[in-house]
């Protein structure tokens, strides 16, 4: 059995911050886990270094379920994004180790491939409808079969999902949180226009998606879902905040536009009511923030009973390690739906060389043993951590709102 002899936390910022856990065993095998929690990175680094690592030394790395239960039940304080991200990092690293010891890619340990590859969606962002569509047409030419569309809102200086002119979209910036202004009325006017124009330009052979990013009330979300019905979206995401899971019942009563939710969920309990009551169509809980491969498989198994499919979060604040884990998971679960793909910068890819690949609108984790991702620690050390916050939104009258 491989015994854990060392575990270290690596914080690096190749263009944006990432926290990575590297576990080493007595036979020299190493495993990687992503522990990045955007805007709150150092809290997970401390949770791991100060509280988890001492408990890992001397444990059998093959006992993944037992280690998971030990960290979850053993903390006494259950759930929450910091705890579950830390557990996820350990879980990913142990699956990585198990795969390397077996000489198999992780998806083979999870039951093998349930499909040839994973359908992914990319982002088309633009300040105007025309810019957004131009970007979407380019992505379609690159082979993407599913595209998320976000555009600027006339009258608002900035909007979630839309990059500053000529820059990559990375929402976390600023030594303190940037403040943006939000108007639901203005937003609800432009989005149906965006999708009408998109269908006109792109036709019907490409899936279209949209992220509301938690900014509508249930009845506003119901209206948006209804207004978008003619354009047959793949989903609208995070239509309303999901702390009150029953809010989705109201949206559901009014629209057949499919609903996706859950990128901020960290356990099966956040999704249970939504899934069991068939209030959603896609669950977006992700391997890094929802307790790793072990716990995400439990969520997917529950969802499968209710024909809810997976649609995991995959923004660039999830490192290539989490992306690989998501693809091993997605390739193997029966109820995979789609995977978000927001390609990392060349700087990030250089720090995390990886085996996963994009072909013809889909991704495959590759067949390297384990997760198929490594870390160049020397290069990582040259990118110092830089504090960065996600922005906050205020209504036009100054009221703090969801961003
Ligand atoms: O990718 C998405 O769907 C997002 O909503 C991205 C989030 O804003 C981002 O991951 C926050 O850190
Ligand atoms: Mg989202």
Image (cartoon, rainbow, N blue to C red):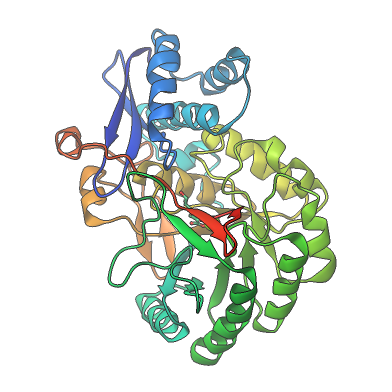
**Residue found 40% across the figure and 70% down from its top:** 360
Taking the view exactly as shown, the residue that stands out farthest to the bottom is 200
| Residue nearest the viewer, comparing 283 with 171 | 171
Does residue 204 lie above or below 13 as drawn? below
> Whole-percent x and y of residue 204?
58, 85
Location of the C terminus (image quadrant): bottom right
Taking the view exactly as shown, the residue that stands out farthest to the top is 58
> In the image, 67: left or right of 39?
right
**Quarter of image, ligand 2:** bottom right
**Residue found 54% across the figure and 18% down from its top:** 71
**Residue found 60% across the figure and 76% down from its top:** 186
Location of the N terminus (image quadrant): top left
Does residue 271 lie above or below 261 as drawn? above
> Whole-percent x and y of residue 155?
50, 77
Does residue 317 lie above or below 49 as drawn? below
Residue 152 is at least partly visible in this image = yes
> In the image, 217: left or right of 151?
right
Residue 1 is at least partly visible in this image = no
């Amino acid at each position: 059995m491989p015994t854990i002899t060392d575990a270290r936390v690596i914080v690096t910022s190749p263009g944006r911050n990432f926290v990575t856990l590297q576990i080493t065993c007595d036979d020299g095998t190493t495993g990687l886990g992503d522990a990045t929690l955007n805007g709150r990175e150092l809290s997970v680094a401390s949770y791991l270094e100060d509280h988890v690592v001492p408990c890992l030394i001397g444990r059998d790395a093959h006992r993944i379920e037992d280690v998971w239960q030990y960290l979850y039940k053993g903390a006494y304080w259950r759930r929450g994004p910091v705890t579950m991200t830390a557990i996820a990092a350990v879980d990913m690293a142990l699956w990585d180790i198990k795969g390397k010891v077996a000489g198999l890619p992780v998806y083979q340990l999870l039951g093998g491939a349930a499909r040839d590859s994973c359908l992914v969606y990319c982002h088309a962002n633009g300040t105007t409808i025309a810019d957004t569509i131009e970007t979407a047409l380019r992505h379609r030419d690159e082979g993407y079969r599913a595209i998320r569309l976000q555009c600027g809102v006339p009258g608002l200086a900035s909007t979630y999902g839309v990059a500053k002119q000529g820059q990559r979209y990375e929402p976390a910036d600023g030594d303190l949180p940037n403040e943006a202004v939000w108007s639901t009325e203005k937003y609800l006017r432009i989005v149906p226009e965006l999708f009408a124009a998109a269908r006109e330009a792109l036709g019907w052979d490409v899936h279209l998606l949209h992220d509301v990013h938690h900014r509508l009330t249930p009845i506003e979300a119901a209206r948006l879902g209804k207004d978008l019905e003619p354009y047959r979206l793949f989903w609208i995401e995070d239509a309303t905040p999901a702390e009150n899971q029953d809010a989705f019942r109201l949206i559901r009563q009014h629209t057949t536009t499919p609903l996706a939710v859950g990128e901020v969920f960290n356990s099966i309990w956040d999704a249970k009511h939504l899934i069991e009551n068939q209030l959603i169509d896609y669950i977006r809980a992700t391997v890094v923030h929802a307790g790793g491969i072990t716990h995400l498989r439990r969520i997917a198994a529950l969802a499968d009973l209710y024909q809810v499919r997976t649609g995991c979060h995959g923004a660039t604040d999830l490192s290539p390690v989490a992306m690989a884990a998501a693809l091993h998971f997605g390739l193997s679960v029966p109820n995979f739906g789609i995977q978000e793909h927001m390609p990392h910068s060349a700087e990030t890819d250089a720090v995390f060389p990886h085996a996963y690949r994009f072909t013809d609108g889909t991704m495959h984790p590759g067949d390297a043993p384990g997760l198929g991702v490594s870390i160049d620690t020397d290069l990582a050390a040259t990118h110092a951590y830089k504090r960065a916050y996600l922005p906050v939104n205020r209504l036009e009258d100054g009221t703090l709102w969801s961003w």
